[in-house]
Image: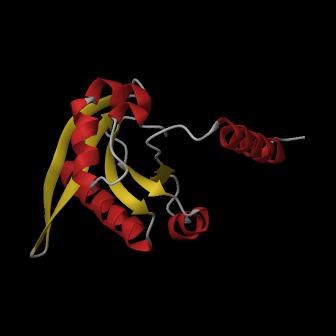
Amino acid sequence: MVLEFLALRDEHSESDLEDALLRHLEESLLKLGGDFAFVGRQRRLRIGAEWYRVDLLFFHRRLHCLVVIALKIGRLMLADTRQMNVYLNYASRHWRRKGENLPVGLILCSEQDEALAQYALKGMGRRILTREYRLALPPEAALVEQLQHARLRLEAKAPR
């Protein structure tokens, strides 16, 4: 996911990222897809004696479910996947309305660790996704290489 339109500097915080996304809400939603509806930011939830905050909360019209988004400025960590699982369980029990599907989570991080994501999220179905964001497109040669790599992966998965 390329978030170049946010015009963030290299050293930014999660709150800088969140503020920029919300300043550019229309563009952000279009980047995510046309079926997202904004529900809230920094939505508070209490579990036991502790208070937590969900960075962004959306509703996806076609999937008919809440989408919990966590913004991470560093690489994906195991704690991030556990945290998202807790948020989804809470959202399912306290925020989901009758007739809605189970909520899904999206962890946006500046560096994705594919191996960690694979093992940490296995068995959770497709309830939690991780995506790497970039503040600018990579150089043309790197972009071509990434596209070729993606094409090869897709061809390997295609039925013969």
Give the percent coordinates (x, y) of residue 159.
84, 41
Q: How is the image coloured?
A: secondary structure
Using the image as rendered, state which of residue 112 and residue 5 is in the foreground.
5
Q: Is residue 53 visible?
A: yes
Give the percent coordinates (x, y) of residue 54.
23, 54
Residue 37 in the image: above or below residue 134: above
Residue 103 in the image: above or below residue 139: below
The quadrant where residue 143 appears: top right
| Quadrant, the C terminus | top right
Residue 79 in the image: above or below residue 54: below
Q: Residue at x 82, y 41 (%)?
A: 155
Give the percent coordinates (x, y) of residue 62.
42, 29
Q: Residue at x 36, y 64 (%)?
A: 85
Residue 84 in the image: above or below residue 136: below
Using the image as rendered, state which of residue 144 and residue 31 is in the foreground.
144
Q: Residue at x 18, y 41 (%)?
A: 40
- The number of callouts visible is 0
The quadrant where residue 37 appears: top left
Q: Is residue 142 left or right of residue 121?
A: right
Q: Is residue 5 left or right of residue 40?
A: right
Direction left: furthest residue:
49
Using the image as rendered, state which of residue 89 and residue 35 is in the foreground.
35
